[in-house]
Amino acid sequence: MPHSVSLINTIAAGLGLALILGFLAARVRLPALVGYLLAGVIIGPFTPGFVADAEIAAQLAEIGVMLLMFGVGLHFSLDDLLAVRKIAVPGALVQIGVATLMGGALATWWGWNLGGALVFGLALSVASTVVLLRALESLGLLDSYTGRIAVGWLVVEDLAMVLVLVLLPPLAGTLGGAADGADASAIWTTLGITLLQVGGFVALMLVVGRRVFPWILWQVTRTNSRELFTLCVVAAAVSIAFASAALFGVSFALGAFFAGMVMRESEFSQRAAEESLPLRDAFAVLFFVSVGMLFDPSVLIERPLQVLAVVGVIVVGKSIAACVLVLAFRYPLNTALTVSASLAQIGEFSFILVGLGVALKLLPPEGQSLILAGALISIATNPLWFSLIAPIQKWLRAHSSFARSLDARDDPLAELPTTTEARYLSRQVVLVGYGRVGRRIAAALTAHHIPFVVAEQNRELVEKLRAEGVAAVWGDAAEPAVLIQAHIARARVLVVATPDAMNVRQMIETARTLNPSIETVIRSHNEDEARLLTQEAAVTVFLGEEELAQAMARDVVRRAVPA
């Protein structure tokens, strides 16, 4: 095959076979990404027949990671990141430590040296951001508070892995690898330089980037060229990601994520997200295909018990550790299970760690095969764990007194203070969610002297609201106990201002059971969901695009009609 057409052959074979197998997977009610992974296995070097260029596929996949993380950054503000820092930072660091210990213990049991055990454990500890984002988007959870916790958690993991990748080479000799050992002062110097680089990058993006990139996007928009606008968006994502890696030692994914965050300051961020969506989806498919190409199916036959143990650490061990950590921070069971499912897989950073470990002669060759097998199996099964969250939650509450106690545990933020004024607890509005939409609704209610109680999952936000004298209760409003604490039985209106529409029906059912005469107003982004809620639940649903169109139409008519 001529090298000049290997790129075309790789893209054609990868996307074409992914389409066929993804379609077949969807027809038998499996996630489409299972088909994408199988497509990679078929065109990979470990199966007979056509073999695509693995190096080109990996680079195409890296572009997909950049674009996907850039898109997430366009919807994820710095405030969102800071809002979850109290759980994401300690949670991610402790979870990395626990998972590394589990993986390292397993490798030590197999007779590997300290360096191999350490690299193996670290590779099992870090989840794939790409897989997580696909799962959250498909479930409509990306904009929810639980989704922000999961994304923030993985951002912290990515930052930690940047430090690991920098520190591993100087430590390789000490850990039994091929490199010469470094003294303590050299290691601390390397760590300090890395922290300065990462800090410099973040500061540059947040201070300079927040002013420069939105200005550039505005200048391009003024040309009225759609092609230039799309080119600007893609060029910003890829160029900033590359520059961050070349100049600051930050990963491509992390660089693209921060690029999206600063571009979000532009009023054209929504258009930028829409214009880049087709490219993001196409290259994300190539990411899963490239993962499949790395997998050698023979490892399932030669080392089945070891593969099973690796998958157990990834899917069971990490998930239990994350669940316990989230519950320890006094978050609801649903949040704990969602974060656990989010982390029950490994991906791109694991592959980078494996490659570095093998190059430094820390990780034995079989370690690479085991980690790739664990990655492919955990990625393929990840949608299953998300689908089991609701049944597991229901079963635990039915059969475990401890699970029921988690919902009823004594938490001062889960109950309204006894000093709450009586006016808040009679004919009030119960406002679920205090994000951008919820804040505006609350401001309007305050301006009209209408009492309201906020139900919010962000503990720090509830603390802040109470300090400001606003009646607020912490928890997931899908849980009856939360609405009961908000005195839904005495309320006049229930307003669901959060974009998380998964549990809206449960909120409505609880509210009407306790207060049959209550009126309900829902926010939605999905036309089908809005139509079903209007027909089946008889509630008032506001659809974002529709309300914007009506408001613009009224303004246009007002201006067009002569006085």
Image (cartoon, rainbow, N blue to C red):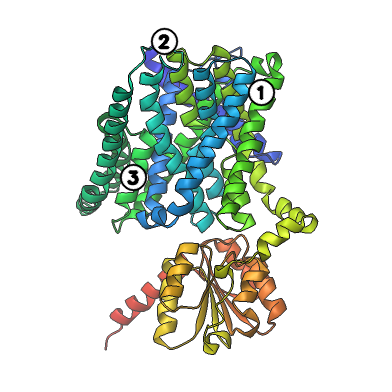
With respect to residue 431, does 113 lie above or below?
above
Q: Which residue is mark 2?
A: 178
Q: What amino acid type should be assigned to the residue bearing mark 2?
A: Ala
Residue at the front extreme, as displayed: 184
Determine the CA span between mark 1 and mark 3: 35 Å
Determine the CA span between mark 2 and mark 1: 27 Å
As helix, strand or loop, the secondary structure at mark 3 comes to helix
With respect to residue 140, does 462 lie above or below?
below
Residue at x 69%, y 78% (from the top left corner) = 512
Sooner in the amino-acid sequence: mark 2 or mark 1: 2
Q: Evaluate whether residue 127 shows in this view.
A: no
Task: State the mark number for residue 258.
Answer: 3
Label 1: how many Cα within 10 Å (few below 14, some 14–19, many 20+):
many
As helix, strand or loop, the secondary structure at mark 2 comes to loop
Sooner in the amino-acid sequence: mark 1 or mark 3: 3
Residue at x 65%, y 30% (from the top left corner) = 311
Q: Which residue is mark 1?
A: 307
Label 3: how many Cα within 10 Å (few below 14, some 14–19, many 20+):
many
Q: Nearer the viewer, residue 415 or 344?
A: 415
Q: What amino acid type should be assigned to the residue bearing mark 3?
A: Phe
Foreground label between 3 and 2: 2
Residue at x 60%, y 20% (from the top left corner) = 108
Task: Name the quadrant of the C terminus.
Answer: bottom left
With respect to residue 143, does 60 lie above or below?
above
Residue at x 65%, y 40% (from the top left corner) = 26
Q: What amino acid type should be assigned to the residue bearing mark 1?
A: Val
Sooner in the amino-acid sequence: mark 3 or mark 2: 2
Q: Nearer the viewer, residue 308 or 512?
A: 308
Q: Percent position (x, y) of residue 430? A: 55, 77
Q: Percent position (x, y) of residue 519? A: 61, 81
Q: Nearer the viewer, residue 372 or 563?
A: 372
Q: Evaluate whether residue 551 shows in this view.
A: yes
